[in-house]
């Protein structure tokens, strides 16, 4: 891009958001994983010559633009949003599998892919380990969106999200060491090994210190304010500030953001945020993360079309096999020491270790004269495409095959009875409506009403019996109805304020009290 026309950049960005939002909306409507849909649509846009989209395509596929958008603009937001809402006790309760995967399995995968890339793919040594670092980062967005649609057990989702949060930071550190220092360390022998280890510890430790300090500082700051728009701004400054500060001193910006967000969401949330503030901060970052993810995956689809795989399909297939084998070995060895971890879950974690936008952004950030840069682009893009499309589309059938869902038999029975009750109640209402319009006579009405009331009574008896056998079902229904009633109360207050029956001050107090009850 020779000249920077900000007005034109804004138009292209807005057009990109519109495409991403449209595809995401359609995918969600049909209960399909939106990241995969966006990658496919992006790839189709990239492959076909659509005049109206050419400007968008050219703008996005600028390597510098893609790298800036993914790493500087969206990565802190995505990491911060995920860590902000992850309770400490979830991490503590699942620390063994999360640490085993994010550190142990990542190192094992890194070493296997690195040496395999050097010996079998014939990549230069530094390039082989750069490729290994790229393939060690996992992207859980696609998998977690699938988990939500099929109702996977919460603990499994926490482990996969926890692994991704920490292994992204580790993968970025390994990438930088492999790309810029590895050969120097190797030439220095044992001294180089010590230098490499010190660099690794320094980068991680500084990231932890910066993230921890800023997270604690901003948490204390929330004690002095009860103003959620201002506290949302605090969170934005915290996420981007910790990332930029850490990167400026050559520390891990990823780890700094994750640690800062964890402390802010847990410690800050407990000492300085009202329930209303928590709800609004979470809602803000939900929107930001959805927007970021939608644009990121569309951009990945567009960027992937830049590669030509026709004349190098052999090395691509071999690279994909190496990555899959390394992931399998790493996951099963890493989790071998974790007790009471179901083997079916290990299969899902293995196959669900998808690669995403971070891998592409990192490889695009390599200097133009980096050894085997074009080969790395080809391999990284190909593995990411395979991962998102093939693994992403097959993870849902695999989940159902292993039966890893929260849909127990009693829950399915309850849903069936509930559906029947709704059908019969609706039919009763329709009978009364038809009677008022004089379409049916009194004797016929009485007969039909008795039939449906009998069905309702029988269904109610079965439901009561089910509640007696499984009390948690009754509690679940009670909680759902309570929440629905609180929403109705909130709407009633809004209507009173709109009709000027109560003042805005009283309306705000009442709505905040209702919101607090909803959160509790």
Image (cartoon, rainbow, N blue to C red):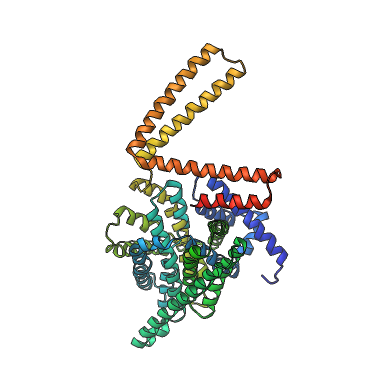
Q: Nearer the viewer, residue 499 or 189?
A: 499
Q: Is residue 175 above or below residue 39?
A: below
- Residue 138 at x, y = what percent? 43, 63
Residue for point 43% across, 21% down: 454
Q: Nearer the viewer, residue 287 or 298?
A: 287
Q: Nearer the viewer, residue 424 or 37?
A: 424
Can residue 375 be seen here?
no
Tell me the quarter of the picture where residue 105 sits.
Answer: bottom left
Question: Which corner quadrant holds the N terminus?
Answer: bottom right
Q: How many marks?
A: 0
Tell me the quarter of the picture where residue 198 sits.
Answer: bottom left
- Residue 121 at x, y = what percent? 39, 69
Can residue 348 be seen here?
yes
- Residue 239 at x, y = what percent? 54, 68
Q: Is residue 308 above or below residue 36?
A: below
Q: Nearer the viewer, residue 158 or 252?
A: 158
- Residue 384 at x, y = what percent? 46, 61
Residue 112 located left or right of residue 233: left
Q: Is residue 196 above or below residue 116?
A: below
């Amino acid at each position: 891009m020779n000249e920077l026309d900000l007005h034109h950049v804004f138009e292209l960005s807005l057009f990109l958001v519109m495409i991403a939002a449209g595809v995401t909306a359609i995918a969600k409507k049909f209960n399909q994983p939106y990241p995969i849909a966006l990658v496919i649509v992006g790839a189709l846009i990239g492959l076909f010559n659509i005049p109206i989209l050419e400007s968008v395509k050219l703008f996005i596929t600028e390597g510098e633009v893609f790298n800036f958008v993914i790493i500087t603009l969206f990565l802190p937001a995505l990491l911060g949003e995920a860590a902000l809402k992850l309770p400490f006790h979830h991490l503590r309760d699942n620390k063994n599998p999360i640490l085993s995967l994010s550190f142990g399995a990542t190192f094992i995968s890194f070493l296997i892919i690195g040496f395999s890339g050097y010996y079998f793919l014939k990549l230069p040594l530094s390039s082989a380990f750069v490729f290994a670092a790229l393939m060690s980062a996992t992207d859980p967005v696609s998998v977690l969106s699938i988990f939500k649609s099929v109702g996977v057990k919460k603990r499994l989702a926490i482990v996969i999200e926890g692994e991704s949060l920490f292994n992204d930071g580790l993968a970025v550190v390994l990438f930088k060491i492999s790309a810029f220092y590895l050969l120097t360390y190797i030439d220095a022998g044992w001294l180089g090994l010590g230098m490499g280890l010190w660099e690794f510890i320094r980068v991680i430790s500084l990231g932890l210190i910066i993230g921890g300090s800023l997270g604690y500082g901003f948490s204390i700051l929330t004690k002095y304010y009860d103003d959620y728009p201002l506290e949302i701004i605090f969170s934005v400054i915290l996420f981007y500030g910790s990332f930029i500060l850490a990167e400026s001193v050559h520390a891990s910006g990823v780890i700094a953001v994750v640690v800062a967000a964890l402390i802010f969401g847990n410690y800050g949330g407990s000492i300085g945020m009202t329930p209303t503030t928590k709800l609004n901060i979470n809602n803000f970052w939900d929107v930001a993360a959805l927007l970021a993810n939608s644009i990121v995956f569309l951009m990945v689809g567009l960027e992937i079309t830049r590669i030509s795989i026709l004349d190098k399909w052999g090395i691509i297939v071999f690279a994909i096999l190496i990555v899959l084998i390394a992931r399998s070995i790493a996951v099963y060895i890493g989790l071998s020491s974790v007790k009471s971890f179901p083997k079916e879950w290990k299969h899902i974690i293995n196959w669900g270790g998808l690669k995403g936008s971070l891998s592409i952004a990192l490889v695009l950030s390599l200097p133009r004269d980096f050894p085997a840069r074009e080969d790395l682009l080809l391999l990284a893009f190909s593995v990411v495409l395979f991962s998102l499309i093939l693994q992403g589309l097959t993870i849902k059938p695999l989940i159902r095959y292993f039966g890893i869902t929260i849909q127990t038999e009693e829950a399915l029975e309850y849903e069936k009875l509930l559906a029947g009750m709704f059908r019969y109640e609706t039919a009763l209402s329709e009978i009364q409506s038809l009677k008022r319009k004089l379409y049916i006579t009194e004797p016929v009405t009485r007969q039909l009403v008795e039939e449906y009331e009998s069905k309702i009574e029988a269904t109610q008896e079965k439901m009561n019996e089910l509640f007696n056998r499984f009390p948690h079902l009754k509690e679940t229904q009670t909680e759902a109805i309570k929440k629905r009633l609180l929403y109705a109360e909130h709407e009633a207050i809004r209507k009173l304020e709109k009709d000027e029956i109560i003042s805005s001050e009283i309306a705000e107090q009442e709505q905040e009290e209702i919101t607090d009850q909803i959160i509790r």
